[in-house]
Image: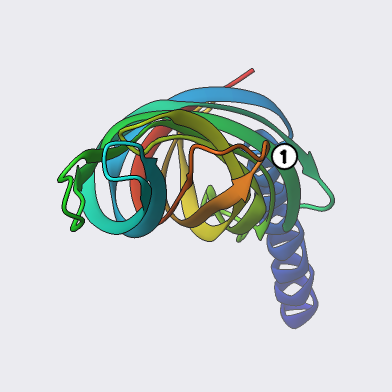
Amino acid sequence: MALRHLVFGTICGLATAVAAEGTVAAESSWRGFYAGVNIGGDFGSGSGSQDDWTRNGWRTSSYDGSSVIGGAQIGYNFQLSPLFILGIENDVEFSGKGSSKNGADQSKATVPLFGSGRLRAGFAPSGLNTLVYGTAGLAFGQVDNGINTRMRGGWTLGGGAEWAFLPSWSAKGEYLYTDISHSFKNDNWGNTEARFHMVRLGVNYHF
């Protein structure tokens, strides 16, 4: 009789623990809209060419640079199950990125504005309030080669982790590699492209 009671009590205890864990998972759901801000840094390289009228010919150059970046993001998560998350995120960043070119003109190449539209897919281990994800999508950037400023398009790829430290708040760390080398418009003023790595920290509010 005592053994039967012990087994019954153990089963009831396990059932209670599973139910409690399910409640925690439900309370820490990642589903829905969110928005936030971020800050970080980027580093990378690029190349460019420009029509130098004073020298009557094309000149090419390259640059390497790094800078502090800051911006904002907004997105939506679909919770496919208590474990798997699929979402979309858009972000825009402001930067003083750039350095002197190695060409003879020594002009400044900068990427003052860039952003992306990405898919995010990841998993949220039960009870940890943490989302680990990979992300990829399209990118754009405003690239200034010293002669003209043009919008460039491309792609971005990376990953990160996000921690829900309060019911409506989360903090994240993220890495992205971005390549903006596609010109939206062909012209006679040359072309500049940029490829760079980015690491940033952010905070999100979940609605």
Q: Amino acid at mark 1?
A: Ile
| Residue holding disc 1 | 88
Relative height, residue 184 to residue 14 (above, below)? above
Most foreground residue, 136 or 46: 46
Give the percent coordinates (x, y) of residue 91.
55, 31
Give the percent coordinates (x, y) of residue 26.
72, 39
In the image: residue 82, left or right of residue 66: right
In this figure, which colouring scheme has been used for the structure?
Answer: rainbow
Relative height, residue 104 to residue 2 (above, below)? above
In the image: residue 85, left or right of residue 206: right
Most foreground residue, 118 or 192: 192
Please name the residue shown 40% across and 45% down the image: 50
Which quadrant of the figure has residue 151? Answer: top right
Give the percent coordinates (x, y) of residue 185.
67, 36
Please name the residue shown 53% across and 47% down the image: 129
Please name the residue shown 15% across and 45% down the image: 106
Within 10 angstroms of label 1, few (less than 14), some, or many (20 or more) residues? some
- Residue lying farthest bottom? 3
